[in-house]
Image: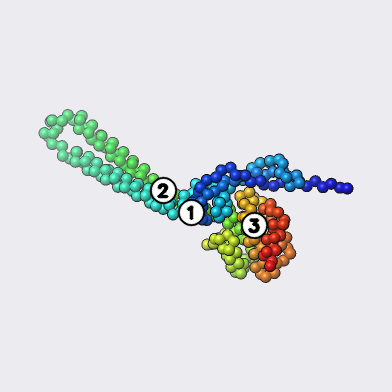
Amino acid sequence: MLAFIIFGTRGIRSTIKQGAFYCPQCQSEKNYKHKKVTQFFTLYFIPLIPLGNKGEYVECQTCRNTYIERVLDIAPVLDITPKKAVASSTTEEQIERFGGQSAQMGIASESAAQTSTPAASQSTPAASSDTSLIDQVKQLAEAEAALVAAQEKVAAEKAEAEKPVDILSEKQKAIKKVLIMMILADGKVEDSEISMFHKVYRDVADSVVPDIYKEIEEVRVENKAPRQYLKQVSAYLNEEGKKDIIKAAMMIAASDGDIDPSEVRMVENFGKALELRTLEVREIIESIKV
């Protein structure tokens, strides 16, 4: 009698930190868990030997979306503009003040040079007048330097405020890319496929893609296989996110009213790349078929 040894690898998730953060999807402060995914060697599906860190992500405990760690540094979108505006206005006031000081000092310097009288010259030593003028020139130079620094600060704050912030969850990014990969599978992009993409992405990812054709071109140039891509992002997705990707893929496959067996096999391979159980993937496929 032959004995089969079943072994493999699997990512195991553990919570390393938790707290409150601004969730871009909920658009309010929510609790989060910062999770780490460790790759384990498994024997008979039991994780035995840790093989290394696969990745980390931040999971909102309300909407269950996952994000890269940088989301913890993102301030609420509604709060960014007022803060920048206040900072900029404060700096602009400094510019006006320094500019005014520069102008006043310039006038003072000219007046000091032009209004010297013989009587004053007799009562004040020449060395003292020279020292006073040098001090005024120094103050003028310092004020002008402060003015330049304040202008540079305003420019830097403006550039920071206008910098785009990536607030898509890892699930939203993965669904978008996988659906586009499926659209490009036959080498042509049809209007009906674009319409279905928008519908599925809105229903499953709860979001929209403003410039779909730009996104399609980026995926085309990248030229990466869906299964390869899903293996890479698997460590940044929770179970809900993975299942939503399978659901979205099946919805696209079924959009023409006829689900081909090859499309089913493709979606099953997506599930393997995401380390989902075969039974879970089949349940999702059957729910879309009905």
Residue type (three-letter) at the residue carrying disc 1: Ser
Q: Amino acid at mark 3?
A: Lys
Q: Amino acid at mark 2?
A: Glu
Element marked by disc 1:
strand
Above/below status of 117 relative to 257: above
Badge 2 or badge 3: first in the primary sequence: 2
Q: Residue furthest left?
A: 119
> Tag on residue 147?
none
Whole-percent x, y for residue 23 in the image: 51, 52
Image-quadrant location for residue 286 = bottom right
Give the alpha-carbon distance from disc 2 to disc 3, as whole Å.
Answer: 41 Å
Q: Which residue is mark 3?
A: 243
Q: Residues within 10 Å of mark 1 (few under 14, many from 20)?
A: few
Instruction: Work out how far the residue at label 1 is from the one at label 2, CA to CA, in angstroms.
Output: 24 Å
Labels 1 & 2 near each other (Cβ < 8 A):
no
Q: Label for residue 28?
A: 1
According to the image, label 2 marks what residue?
157
Q: Residue at x 17, y 40 (%)?
A: 114
Q: Can residue 131 be seen from the camera position used here?
A: yes
